[in-house]
Amino acid sequence: MARPRATTSAADFLPEELSLPALREAAAACKGCDLWKLGTRTVFGEGPESAEVMFVGEQPGDQEDRVGKPFVGPAGRLLDKALAEAGIDRSTTYMTNAVKHFKWQARGKRRIHQKPTWAEVTACRPWLESEVAVVHPRVLVLLGATAAQSLLGRQFRVTQNRRSLVDSDLADAVTATIHPSAILRGEPERRESEFAAFVDDLRFVASLL
């Protein structure tokens, strides 16, 4: 008897119809990697299909996993503040993550974020690529190394490419900046200056729209 084939990619779960509702429904049952065993639910992207700008982060956090929506935790609130200062209306954007399940490790009663492996990022990439294909944003903004390397390759360095355009056919304009969680994890005395620099990055994004 033939052994069942191991599933190692979200590609096995993609729907025939590539639309946001169909993708969201199909992603809810994804078992393309083992992270579905950790996350409470798949946290798919959110926003209008007509969005001109798409923001891609690393993965959902604790609050995103509980609520089922991207960027609603502390990093999301910081992003909202930065978007407002940069003059970008979040409701007109599409927000998603490179990895759709929350990877965590228990520390007492807390669930502590764990960085996804390259294999997990690769396994989840078909969802992200499908979102980019359906939304077809004019501007694609990659937040942090995991998101940027997922679509641009493992050699990409965010710190060397902030506030600049990346040569890519993913969108008319592709750019990268830090993930807002990096500001929250940083030294307290540097948070104000790091936030200001992040806002400047988003003002660059606004200038592309």
Image (cartoon, helix red, strand yellow):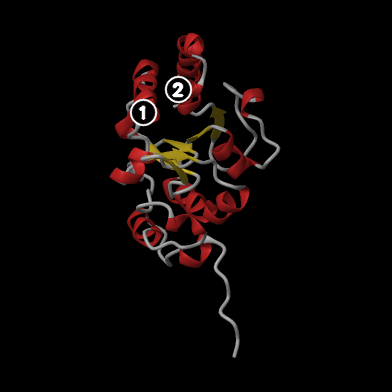
Q: Secondary structure at mark 2?
A: helix
Quadrant location of residue 49?
Answer: top left
Q: Is residue 172 above or below residue 7?
A: above
Q: Position of residue 188 (x, y in %)?
A: 47, 13
Q: Is residue 199 above or below residue 58?
A: above
Q: Which residue corresponds to the image point at 52% horizontal and 63% vertical from the top-left? A: 11
Q: Secondary structure at mark 1?
A: helix
Q: From the viewer's perspective, tell me whether residue 60 is left or right of residue 63.
A: right
Q: Which residue corresponds to the image point at 62% horizontal and 32% vertical from the top-left? A: 166
Q: From the viewer's perspective, tell me whether residue 84 is left or right of residue 140.
A: left
Residue 186 visible to the viewer: yes
Furthest residue in direction right, as rendered? 155
**Badge 1: few (under 14), some or many (20 or more) residues near its Cα, within 10 Å?**
some
Q: Position of residue 180 (x, y in %)?
A: 46, 26
Given residues 167 and 125, the one toward you in this image is 125
Residue at the spot of label 2: 184
- Could you tell me which quadrant the C terminus lies in? top left
Residue flagged by tag 2: what amino acid is it?
Leu
Quadrant location of residue 60?
Answer: top left
Residue at the spot of label 1: 74
Q: Position of residue 170 (x, y in %)?
A: 56, 43
Q: From the viewer's perspective, tell me whether residue 57 is left or right of residue 169.
A: left
Alpha-carbon span between mark 1 and mark 2: 8 Å
**Circle 1/circle 2 CB separation < 8 Å:** yes
Furthest residue in direction front, as rendered? 108
